[in-house]
Amino acid sequence: MINFSATYTDQYQLAMAEVYFNNGHKDHIAVFDYYYRKNPFQGGYAVFAGLEDLLRILQDLKFTKKDLEYLRKGGFSDKFLSYLKNFRFTGTIYASHEGDIVFPNRPILQVEANIIEAQIIETMLLNLLNFQTLVATKASRIRLVAGNRHLMEFGMRRAQGAGSYHASRAAIIGGFNGTSNVIASEDFNIPVSGTMAHSFIQSFDDELEAFRSFAKGRPNNCVLLVDTYNTLSSGLPNSITVAKEMEQRGQKLAGIRLDSGDLAYLARESRKMLDNAGLDYVKIIASNQLDEYVVKSLLEQKAPIDIFGIGTSLVTGQPDAALDGVYKLSMSNGKPRLKISETLAKITIPHIKQVYRIRDKNGELIGADAITLREETELEKIYDPVGPLKSLPVKEFYMEPLLHKVMENGHIQIESRSVWDIAEYAAERLESLPPEYKRFDNPHIYKIGISRRLKEERENLIKKYKKMDHEDVDHN
Amino acid sequence: MINFSATYTDQYQLAMAEVYFNNGHKDHIAVFDYYYRKNPFQGGYAVFAGLEDLLRILQDLKFTKKDLEYLRKGGFSDKFLSYLKNFRFTGTIYASHEGDIVFPNRPILQVEANIIEAQIIETMLLNLLNFQTLVATKASRIRLVAGNRHLMEFGMRRAQGAGSYHASRAAIIGGFNGTSNVIASEDFNIPVSGTMAHSFIQSFDDELEAFRSFAKGRPNNCVLLVDTYNTLSSGLPNSITVAKEMEQRGQKLAGIRLDSGDLAYLARESRKMLDNAGLDYVKIIASNQLDEYVVKSLLEQKAPIDIFGIGTSLVTGQPDAALDGVYKLSMSNGKPRLKISETLAKITIPHIKQVYRIRDKNGELIGADAITLREETELEKIYDPVGPLKSLPVKEFYMEPLLHKVMENGHIQIESRSVWDIAEYAAERLESLPPEYKRFDNPHIYKIGISRRLKEERENLIKKYKKMDHEDVDHN
């Protein structure tokens, strides 16, 4: 549906690119780290999503004729435009597997490319990874409380424009079973489903007639929306009438949908009425401004809801709306690079790095990922990057490397997985995370540690920058 | 950039459409109202945006061969797929002008079409109008506090995926001057601009060298980012050095950008340093997690900031993330239709309607829009639709009709306006709204009133529905 062009970027990327093109830096190799700083939803983790989408787009990325014409009007030089005409992304990318659980302040993805290519793709990379990771994380939180209930993403109408498209994909990765979004289901091969709207019922002179017509037209997946007039005194009795008529025809009513009112009470009353009519197979679907907290509360109240339809809060990642992912230079032209800040936590970590997930001898996560120089193979201890005295011996532990080569010289290096496979991987990875990191209130903080060599390299670089420019870092 | 196909919809629209196709209702004419229920951002109004986009998409809407193939696999019948193959939107739409200020619970747009077409377009219509209206409203709030400062939309990297595209357009309608989003500027013909990133500076061995290179490469619109190492002890002195060198070459440094720290303090100190160096023409740009409240506070502190760059909060419409716009059936097959609810305010208003903005003899808004039957021409009084006793005589007032025919039989009936023209119209309309409706804290509530005939028709219909289905409306 969307044709991503290389102009899917911020203007300053092109401005900087033109300067690099002219100042002799154009073939400098740059290394950028993608990471985020704060877990969304005050939670303890995020589910990394968007990677395989991004790689497919990067592999085919170019400036169209129309793009170049537009940039010419914007004042870019002919020489630079000729360069852009042949622009392809030819860099190498290391990344966590899509669907992995990830944590703040550690590289999730690393781009190595000439500095022009690395800059031009920055905006698109952030745009796609930040948003899909946000939504997949939200979806995973709903999955955590929903157990094995069926979860449907119903958010397209309130989604942020075409953001709906990737939101539907990310919802599946985070643990949803399907979407109402037809074009996303078509392009990403994910199950689509839908029920009926109030307008359908209103367009008939009475509700029973509407239900009958729908049941006749969609006998195989008939879900009746029961709250147009009155759920318990009208919607339910009419649904039961229609279900019985369907039985006469050898058909089965699939479900009823509650879309307003006190869902716990109405679900319970509806279940009783259905069961009393011998319709225990008819499922109850609930929708209407649900999120992980409402679903949790409904299930704590033992509301007999089989399927949840969740929209706005999921597809817009409420209440956060954005993941604060950043893309920071860690090497260029063969030298480690640093961004200074008044707080140690915001000072970047230079060099080309690897990240390890640490497990104890029993295979249990110890609650920390380790960041090392890529070439380091032995690791004795890891150090808190912001509290210089804290350290942890890790020699006896099992270290799983997390950054894998996913693209080399612009070519994808991994086999494409279906959204389902990614979702399954995400579920496994999340399952291995102890519950204290997954609880909603004040979750345990999953830590990062850095290797001694990386710590020393970083400290030396900080000293050098501070000396070079000023006596001390100011408070800005 | 985006190819909107007719599968940009929810599955249930197609399910209902197939039922209508088979049950003899397919040529029933339906009328749907688009409106929202709650002003975003706890404000007193919204800026209607997205209309002209929507109309262009509707005029060309169809199912592609690939769409039909996909739907065939989804179990839709051959007969229905043949119908979809020739599907076009051939309906008629009345709407407020794009850019008008609008208020809750009154029709902003009205679709009259056969019921299949009216349903299939629902999701897209809500998706595009809800989101653009949200962002245009957010932008207008920032414009209200920013006076005539230059406002740039910088949100692409944190936007909700491809939602960035329409967010940039809506930001201009709400009062922004430009965007960093290249593809949006290309497709919507809006000014693009950008400065430089920290990575540019980090990629050099020192900041002064980086500034010099950038100034040489972009002499005509050179903005230097000054906080990579230390704003006042490094970024500013180096900027001044480069500005002086540019003067020697007959060039002028356009600006400096502050992107962290206490922006009020740093702007003031930076201004002093620049002025003392005879660089009073160099502008100060500020960015970093700004919204209408921060901009207001900065200007109350008299921070000498000339240009604001605003990202996440604008393009994601924080903290709301979604406008609660709905699309409700008000007529079908020649009959007025109603959706019942326990609260009178949530019961829909049936019939084909017109909406008027009321001004007193001096041309001032009286603070209410009136909803009438479309054919009503004389209006004596308007009535509060939720408090039946309140009424207001309006005979002496000037009534401006707000719903205009914008599409007829699927063809656009209005001249296409540039995004600038729409923005200018929005600014004028907002200017005419008294300040008490525009303040951020507890704004005055702009009211709606309905005509006596509409009120009576609605009450009769409510009675009829209540009688038909049950004795009273339950509390669901």
Image (spheres, coloured by chain):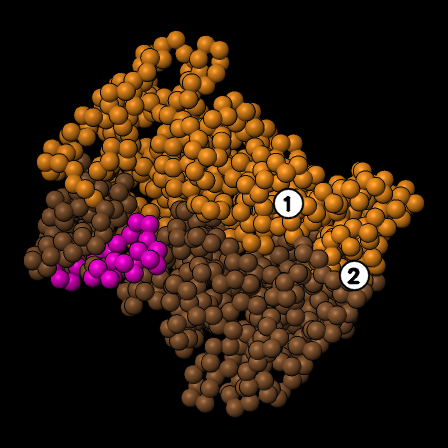
Chain colours: A orange, B brown
Residue beneath the point at 52% across and 79% down:
B357
Q: Which one is in front, B224 or A283?
A: A283
Query: Considering the image in quadrants, where does the C terminus of chain B appear?
Result: bottom right
The chain identifier of the residue carrying mark 1 reads: A
Residue A36 percent across, percent down from the top left:
38, 36
**Dot 2 lies on which element?**
loop
**Residue B301 part of the magenta-drawn span:** yes
Residue farthest right in this picture: A248
Instruction: Report the mark closest to the observer, 2 or 1.
Output: 2
Q: Which contiguous range is marked in magenta? A: B279-302
Q: For the residue marked with disc 1, what is the amino acid?
A: Gly
Compared to residue B449, the image places residue B323 above or below, namely above
Residue beneath the point at 30% across and 45% down:
A17
**Residue A100 part of the magenta-drawn span:** no
Determine crowd level at label 1: few under 14, some 14-19, many 20+ residues with C-alpha closer than 10 A: many
Q: Which one is in front, B127 or B370?
A: B370
Q: Which mark is residue A157?
A: none
Q: For the residue marked with disc 2, what is the amino acid?
A: His
Left or right: where does residue A414 sit relative to residue A33? right
Residue beneath the point at 19% across and 42% down:
A475
Residue B200 percent across, percent down from the top left:
25, 42
Name the residue beneath numbered marker 1. Answer: A309
Name the residue beneath numbered marker 2. Answer: B470
